Amino acid sequence: MYIPIGNDMAVRDSSIIGIFDLDNCSWAYRTREFLNRAEENGEVVPVTDDLPKSFIVTAEYGMNKIYLVQFNSVTLEKRSIGT
């Protein structure tokens, strides 16, 4: 199954490692370091032009991607379980 993440994009639910809220996670040094390293490696995909509210970490076919999305983590979680 696919989860819509905005701007006509979707990710496969089986490839999702985690969905994280930027407001709660970005203050931690390790999270900022992780996101900076992913951006340097070209693994960050901005899905929105607006300020992102959460990020999705995926791994599929040996490639890691981090999607910066406009929806909060609760909305994405509801989309993933179909309620």
Image (cartoon, helix red, strand yellow):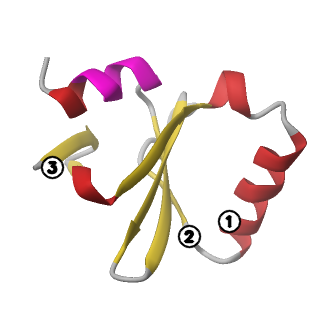
Residue 41 at x, y percent in the picture: 67, 77
Q: Which residue is drawn at 31% across and 60% down?
A: 15
Magenta highlight range: 72-78
CA distance separating discs 2 and 1: 6 Å
Mark nearer the N terminus (2 vs 3): 3
Q: Residue 43 carries which label?
A: 2
Q: Is residue 17 left or right of residue 4?
A: right
Is 66 included in the stretch rendered in magenta? no
Q: Residues within 10 Å of mark 1 (few under 14, many from 20)?
A: some
**Dot 2 lies on which element?**
loop
From the viewer's perspective, is residue 69 above or below residue 81? below
Which quadrant is home to the C terminus?
top left
| Dots 2, 1 in contact, CB < 8 A | yes
Image point (55%, 35%), residue name: 20
Circle 3/circle 1 CB separation < 8 Å: no
- The image shows residue 40 at horizontal and vertical percentages of 73, 73
Q: Which residue does the numbered mark 1 point to in the structure image? A: 39
Q: Does residue 25 appear to the left or right of 83 in the view shown?
A: right
**38 is higher (above) or lower (below) than 80:** below
Q: Which residue lies furthest to the right in this view?
A: 29
| Secondary structure at numbered mark 1 | helix
Q: Can you see residue 49?
A: no
The residue drawn where x is 68% and y is 22% is 23
The type of residue carrying mark 3 is: Tyr
- Residue 2, labelled with which disc? 3
Question: How far apart are labels 2 and 3 at the CA level?
Answer: 20 Å
Please tell me which residue lies in front, 67 or 60. Answer: 60
Q: State the residue in front, 12 or 69.
A: 12
User: Of the residues shown, which amino acid type is indicated by label 1?
Assistant: Glu
Tell me the SS state at disc 3.
strand
The amino acid beneath tag 2 is Glu
